[in-house]
Amino acid sequence: MGFKSIDYFNIDELYTEEELLIRDSIRKFVDDEVIPIIEQYYFDGKYPEHLTPKLAELGVFGITLSEEYGGAGANYTSYGLAMQELERGDSAVRSFASVQNSLVIYPISRYGTEEQKRKWLPRLVRGEAIGCFGLTEPDFGSNPAGMITTAKRTDGGFLLNGAKMWITNGTVADVAVVWAKLDGEIHGFLVEKGTKGFSAPEMRGKHSLRASVTSELIFEDCEIPEENILNIAGLRGPLSCLNQARYGIAWGAIGAALAVFHSALEYSKSRIQFGKPIAKFQITQEKLVWMLNEITKAQLVCYRLGRLMDEGKARPEHVSFAKRNNVDIALECARIAREIHGANGILGEYPVMRHSANLESVKTYEGTHEIHTLILGRDITGEDAFE
Ligand code: TGC
Ligand code: FAD
């Protein structure tokens, strides 16, 4: 039998048959093909490349994209449920799908010319092309508005100079969506693999998201043809993409929390100390109930957020709320689950330490916990901490 998730408030009853079908097909894939292999890839510091065509076959790339460009044309709730299941396997697999969907397919479909869409979208959906998204720079993380990567106009296009850092899939990407300042204003450019003056060395030495490729992007008089500029200007271009990716992360975090919760619950019933299962101790029960509470609240927030996204009523602040809360509680669940597993919790035999280490990155990327706090603080007080 496949994974049976806790659903304390019968939230499944609120989903449509189609939404549950999409979730369950990905749930099965994660049980059969991700969980059995991911620990070794994590340990070796490698992304399991062989999963990419299988993810494409399952329709994971371009879930919400219109069928005209090869997408599944499904709703945001289905997208969220898919991200939840992928991150139950590992944050790296969800990251891969987040970047491909929200940070590459989304900007090309929203801001691309018809030619750019026809060239890239069907290949990205089929997993035949991989994309990455370059916003963060060595000196500008939380404050991307300060970026110093520049684009200068030339006769046939643009000349890009600068560097990006911490870019998921940079080294393996066929196309990079890169944000740079042109005449002082932020613009998006499609930089193709092999372009002269462009390199993407892999960053090594991570203790988190080890099964994900993370890279620098370096531009040294990199020549970009005129037709590779996206049709958007200003910070709202990249921020609108982040909104999509943060939405997926809010759901993904529930998946990671479910993985560690179920592991801790099972372990607590079978581990005997002082002649009893540790589940019999009140302190263990309190820990498990804390996780149950927080996971259930996170599930309800995401259910509602999904519907708001589908109705076109979600504000970026709603997304910040969900990303901030759900990643925070997932990380806390992972730390508590590690405690419940005792020393065994640090072993790769159980998923808790891997999820815990991954969630440290997830709490930082796509807007740190503090940045989302300040986005929400600005919304309710009217006072802008970033000015
Ligand atoms: P602000 O004045 O707030 O906004 C500037 C313009 O952008 C619009 N906007 C948004 N539009 C859509 N979605 C959103 N979420 C938006 N947030 C803002 C806004 O309406 C405005 O538009 P306009 O037309 O009036 O110009 O700008 P600010 O400078 O005050 O923003 C500050 C701050 C800190 C909130 C922003 O810079 C921020 O969010 N910083 C965090 C940076 C970040 O999240 N980086 C992530 C990099 S990518 C990544 O981590 C990928 S991980 C992938 C993986 O592996 O899963
Ligand atoms: P900083 O911005 O230097 O922040 C350091 C600390 O200061 C944080 O705690 C932060 O919350 C705090 N801080 C900063 N400003 C304020 C403030 N105003 N008030 C209070 N506290 C503040 N980026 C991409 O563009 N593309 C990617 O694909 C991508 N993938 C990533 C993958 C991984 C594994 C990781 C770890 C990061 C990735 N990132 C990516 C980068 C990520 O988005 C940034 O790390 C993140 O935005 C934070 O930037 P920073 O690390 O420079 O931290």
Image (spheres, rainbow, N blue to C red):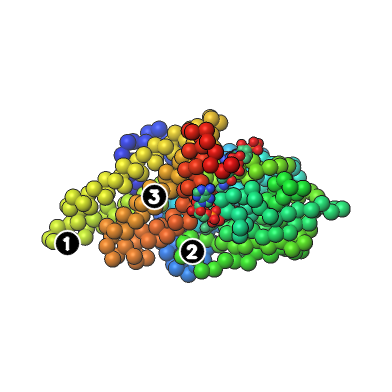
Tag on residue 273? 1
- Which percent across, then down, holds residue 139? 61, 58
- Which percent across, then down, holds residue 108? 67, 45
Q: CA distance from mark 2 to mark 1?
A: 34 Å
Give the residue type that dot 1 points to.
Gln
> N-terminal of the two: label 2 or label 1?
2
The structure residue drawn at horizontal position 18% and vertical position 61%, both measured from the top left corner, is 272
User: Is disc 1 placed on a helix, strand or loop?
Assistant: strand
Q: Is mark 2 within 8 Å of ligand 2?
A: no
> N-terminal of the two: label 3 or label 2?
2
In the rendered image, is residue 69 in sight?
no
Report the residue marked by disc 2: 210
Give the residue type that dot 2 points to.
Arg
Q: CA distance from mark 1 to mark 3?
A: 27 Å
Q: Is mark 3 within 8 Å of ligand 1?
A: no
Give the residue type that dot 3 points to.
Ala
- Which percent across, then down, holds residue 340? 27, 57
| Residue 7 vertical placement versus 360 (above, below) | above
Tag on residue 330? 3
User: Is disc 2 placed on a helix, strand or loop?
Assistant: loop
User: Is disc 3 placed on a helix, strand or loop?
Assistant: helix
Image quadrant of residue 275? bottom left
Whether label 2 touches label 1, CB < 8 Å: no
Q: CA distance from mark 3 to mark 2?
A: 18 Å
Image quadrant of residue 289? top left
Image quadrant of residue 68? top right
